[in-house]
Image (cartoon, rainbow, N blue to C red):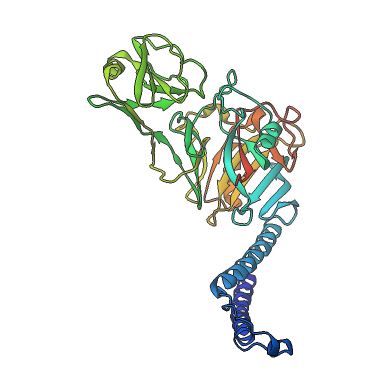
Amino acid sequence: MDTLFYAANREKILNSFIVSSIMGVLVFTQTFFINPPMFADDIKIAHISEPSPVIDTGQIKDKILNEFSMETRAKNFDEKIKKKYPKAVIADVYSGVKHIKVTKYYDGRPVRINIVEIDLKLADDFELKPALSSTTNNLRSRRTITTIAKNTNSIVAVNGTYFKPQTGVPLGTLMIDGKVYTGPVYDRVAMGIFDKGFDMARVQFDSELEGSKNTVKVDNINQPRMLVTHVIVYSKDWGKTSPASPKYGFQIAIKDNKVVGASYSSLTIPDGGYVIVGPAKLLRPLAFEKKVKLKIGTSPDWKDVKHIISGGPYLVKNSEVFVDMTAQKLGSVGGKNPRTAIGYTKDNEMIMVAVDGREGSSVGMTLMQLAHLMKSLGCVNAMNLDGGGSTVMYVNGKVVNKPQVRGGITLSNALVLAKKIN
């Protein structure tokens, strides 16, 4: 409190000093340009006076105050991290980005933890976002976290959401730069990333294919089929062709809002278009529509969301420990294991955690232990990501934890702090 009070007073004093200094400069400038000093040459040559330059004092003041404010913010961030982790090894990654290494003990057994805390207002040259392993956005791809980080020019990365091991296709909602690549699975929790912060909720798909006479509810996009009754959209990111139709199924290929193909079997996915697969009784009438439109949305309706990454289960919800493992059909991820988690504080600072496990020097954590850890770190909302053999953290060019496979297994996707593209 004393530090913040002192900083506030300093800012008021600096503000007064800036205003006084600017006024002094203006008085001097006016005196110099309106009544310039007389020199011997002025008697011989008549000079036409140029108009006085216009000085925007507001911009000058805002710029100086902003630089001062960021300096104060960076100092407060540094002091807060030191106080929060008194016995940890703390490394500076970038302005507003700290890497913390700490060992905690649970029931007398050690757990090795790597943490990254990010103040995105300080690290404003970087953007937090999900990243696919493929540089061509092909969902059927797997690469190491080091490759994903380097491909995205990232200084921090952790493994992302669950994925199908055989293909690499992410299992759960994944949106990057406003484009939905995959839809939700089992109504699992997801984090939305906005320009000015974050949100976390159990996300559902709220989409439909609309024609002039018929409208069909769309259940998912680029995901494995759960029920024969589901209507699923497959884009070019899925692959060259759509999967086989379910029993009594039908498929329609659409490009530029026009039906370009229809079949009871797999279809080639058109460039810039998609194939929609579902029950014939629902889709066949749409095959004769002159124009159809796909409307993609989520519930809750996250307006202006830029990126979404899903996981599960919840760990912290509204500042309280909340582990809904059964509700999200994640019974198989119990026990003490390597863990990856993300969360954010009331000040919208991001916290990324990687816990090593399955070895004597680090036995791993249960989901409940992880939830209590995330709450203790100040998270108002937090969620579990894919863990076990997938848990890996990358900071400034190297893997900083000790995954079971050296360098980490190949991954489908990651959450990265990537250099912004101007």
Which residue is more in the foreground, 308 or 151? 151
- Residue 293 screen position, x and y as percent: 33, 29
Q: Which quadrant of the structure image shows residue 39?
A: bottom right
Rendered position, 404 above or below 51: above
Going 43% across and 37% down the picture, which residue do you hit? Answer: 203
Which residue is more in the foreground, 104 or 39? 39
- Residue 104 screen position, x and y as percent: 71, 45
- Observer able to see residue 157: yes
Instruction: Check the picture and name the quadrant holding the N terminus.
Output: bottom right
Looking at the image, the residue that sits furthest to the front is 44
Rendered position, 201 above or below 174: below
Answer left or right for 53 relative to 286.
right
Answer left or right for 374 relative to 40.
left
Which residue is more in the foreground, 349 or 141? 141
- Residue 275 screen position, x and y as percent: 41, 20
Going 41% across and 26% down the picture, which residue do you hit? Answer: 220
Rendered position, 319 above or below 251: below
Answer left or right for 293 relative to 164.
left
- Observer able to see residue 251: no
Q: Which quadrant of the structure image shows residue 11?
A: bottom right
Which residue is more in the foreground, 141 or 262? 262
- Residue 13 screen position, x and y as percent: 62, 80
